[in-house]
Image: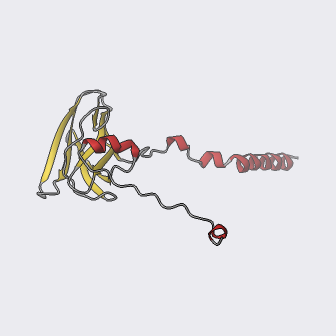
Amino acid sequence: MNIRKIATVTIAASLMLGTSGCTFVSPIASRIEYTPSDGSQVTLKHVDARNFIYLSDGKGNAALIGSLVNRGLTSTSVKLQYTDATSSEKKEAFFTLLPSQKLDFGYNGATALDFDLGGKPGALVTVFVVADGEAGQAMNVPVLDGTLPEYAEIFKGLGASMPEVTEAPAEVPADEASH
């Protein structure tokens, strides 16, 4: 009789695990970190560099936009390092963020950073982010032009020439083209 009870319990447990097992190993989609926009981001111990984009018309009018966020409870020093495309010199820009402060560049009425990173639209440029002397991280920033409407106003503010958008001609179905 004990064998039947053990077999029944084993089969019941196997059925429960077999039908619900995927919920034990399936990752929760809302917990997966991703970049929710067109830019790049880096997360350091207490500082986030968010949505960094280099807007350029490929003719010398360009600027770096993005945000720095201090998640810590104390003031934090942040350094952005980059290589100047014209002089090939390593350059640095320093910022002090108060506790829980967000510092915008090119967003919310703030001016963009006038960095000469080179790069043509469609390429990537590198900016190194360091906070409070900890090991920093390289951020590969996309180079965009003014094609996307959400960046058109910022792009115009750079004095850059807007790219010409040409629409593809509408395709005519083959059966109508022969008439």
Query: Which residue ends up furthest to the front in the rendered image?
Result: 179
Q: Residue at x 19, y 36 (%)?
A: 95
Between 167 and 176, the one lying in front of the other is 176
Q: Is residue 48 visible?
A: yes
Q: Residue at x 45, y 44 (%)?
A: 33
Q: Is residue 50 visible?
A: no
Compared with 94, 120 (above or below) is below
> Where on the picture, by quarter, is residue 29?
top right
Compared with 134, 102 (above or below) is above
Between 80 and 13, the one lying in front of the other is 80
Query: Which residue ends up furthest to the bottom in the rendered image?
Result: 178
Between 174 and 102, the one lying in front of the other is 174
User: In the rendering, at what x and y percent does residue 99 appear?
Assistant: 27, 27
Circle count: 0
Q: Residue at x 15, y 46 (%)?
A: 92
**Colouring used for the render:** secondary structure
User: In the rendering, at what x and y percent does residue 160 appear?
Assistant: 25, 49
Q: Which quadrant holds the C terminus?
A: bottom right
Between 88 and 47, the one lying in front of the other is 88
User: In the rendering, at what x and y percent does residue 127 appear?
Assistant: 24, 50
User: In the rendering, at what x and y percent does residue 79 appear?
Assistant: 19, 42
> Where on the picture, by quarter, is residue 132?
top left
Compared with 38, 48 (above or below) is above
